[in-house]
Amino acid sequence: WTYEWRTNYRNSPTSSEYKIIAADRDTFSCRGRRNYQFTQWSDDLSLTVLNKPAAKLTASDTIIPAGGSVTLTCSVSGSDGWKFDLLRRQSVDHKDQFIRTNEPDGVFIISDEGVYSCRGGRGDPVFYTETSIKVIINEIGQLVPVLSVSPSWLNPGASVTLSCEGLEHQPAGWRFFWYKAVPDPSVSYYRFELLPGTSGTEQNFTINGPTHTAGFVCRAGRGEPVNYTDYSEPKFIWSADPRPAASLSVNPDRVQHFRSESVSLSCEGNSAEWRVKRFTETGKLSNFSNWGTINGSTCNITSYWFNSGVYWCESGSGEFSNAVNITVHDDDSAPLLLSPVHPVTEGDPVTLSCRDKKQQLLSNVFFYHNDELLDFGSRGELNISAVSKSDEGFYKCQHSGKDSPRSWMSVRGEEEENV
Ligand SMILES: *[C@@H]1O[C@H](CO)[C@@H](O)[C@H](O)[C@H]1NC(C)=O
Ligand SMILES: *[C@@H]1O[C@H](CO)[C@@H](O)[C@H](O)[C@H]1NC(C)=O
Ligand SMILES: *[C@@H]1O[C@H](CO)[C@@H](O)[C@H](O)[C@H]1NC(C)=O
Ligand SMILES: *[C@@H]1O[C@H](CO)[C@@H](O)[C@H](O)[C@H]1NC(C)=O
Ligand SMILES: *[C@@H]1O[C@H](CO)[C@@H](O)[C@H](O)[C@H]1NC(C)=O
């Protein structure tokens, strides 16, 4: 037998197998021929081609540090058997050029900046996907690691792990260096002091049982003499417990405040010179300078500059105070939860209340602990006669279908008090 093919658009070959590049919707049928006899045409077979597949290019990082590299990965989702080509445009005046072709795993390690794109191809004759979206890779001079601390609020006696991250995609061989960030009025920032015995450690560093608020930075280095990265941004571990040497209080004394209210923060302790710092929910560290007015060690915050975050004081002699959470509430029509700023001690009585903008106690209120409704009638106050560790957690109140923000209440064991 020889064969004959009938398709929408193509001339037909004569073999029993007919290879096509799937590109459009197509209908096929075939018939056999022997001597001068023909069979009937077969039933039509319709092929529907899904969207033309596109290649996707992802980069481990869009910045190449001096002497470093980044990994680009080209992929086509939902199907396999592809080989990948990488294109690079050196600069705007240049054309896209193929710099690698037919790579089966689609992983490219590159160390030159430029505008990269890729495509996949498979089959014979080769069918190519659409070219991917372009990815811009820039070269920079200095690497900046990112420090993370966990947990960021101290539990008395527990250890804290610092991790110096962001170099995972760089060639190996880094050693890590850890510094205490000491408030320094003469530079109105921090002075970095190498922690004893931490010159060139592993990527993670554990501090056992720290007891005060403290700031840290890290950097990495390699080679001999050592080539250092830049210092990371400072990160903090916060202690909630006020100390005689340095303490911060908030007036009115509660976590939540309406933006329209006036709030003042006071630093107290063995210093004549204080600075108030905050770390906002968006991870931004700032100094109290122009967010309000200051008189001695008390500052009044102007609503425009008031933001939710963690606040603390730093003394002229380098001491850190306890830290507090402050939540700024923008919705004047929703209730406000009044909860303690400082940790409460096991066995002590605690009252949480739910108030409106004029500080009137609301009635018909529901309180939630870790998102579970508490069954305490619906008075505007929640009285706990002797608080226990299980009362720790997030609280919020609800009035007329509107929720207050939620706030954390810390509970300290009696034995932890003097740690
Ligand atoms: C380092 O710490 C980070 C964050 O705590 C953790 O995810 C990672 O597994 C740790 N790495 C090592 C090598 O211990
Ligand atoms: C330090 O970095 C520079 C610039 O990247 C490089 O030329 C030099 O080889 C590096 N030195 C070492 C010891 O790695
Ligand atoms: C501040 O809030 C966090 C949770 O967002 C909590 O872990 C921490 O203990 C709180 N600090 C104080 C002093 O309540
Ligand atoms: C600053 O504080 C002092 C002492 O508490 C007080 O006498 C003075 O009136 C305050 N000044 C302002 C502008 O509030
Ligand atoms: C801060 O606000 C309080 C109360 O409104 C006021 O008595 C005090 O004088 C203010 N202090 C400054 C420095 O503006």
Image (spheres, rainbow, N blue to C red):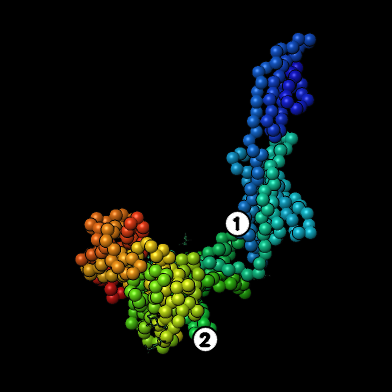
Label 1 SS:
loop
* Residue drawn at 25 percent across, 68 percent down: 350
Q: Tell me the kind of residue under disc 2.
A: Ser
Indicate the position of residue 229 as horizontal and vertical percent values.
Answer: 59, 70
The answer, for residue 235, to whether it is visible in the render is: yes
- Marks 1/2: CA distance? 40 Å
* Residue drawn at 25 percent across, 58 percent down: 378
Q: Is residue 203 left or right of residue 353?
A: right
The quarter of the displayed image where residue 122 is located = top right
Q: Residues within 10 Å of mark 1 (few under 14, many from 20)?
A: some
* Residue drawn at 49 percent across, 72 percent down: 285
Q: Nearer the viewer, residue 403 or 204?
A: 403
Q: Is residue 350 above or below residue 290?
A: above
Ligand 5's quadrant:
bottom left
Q: Nearer the viewer, residue 221 or 6?
A: 6
Indicate the position of residue 85 as horizontal and vertical percent values.
Answer: 70, 47
Label 2 SS:
loop
Q: Is residue 193 above or below residue 124?
A: below
The answer, for residue 325, to whether it is visible in the render is: no
Q: Is residue 413 above or below residue 109?
A: below
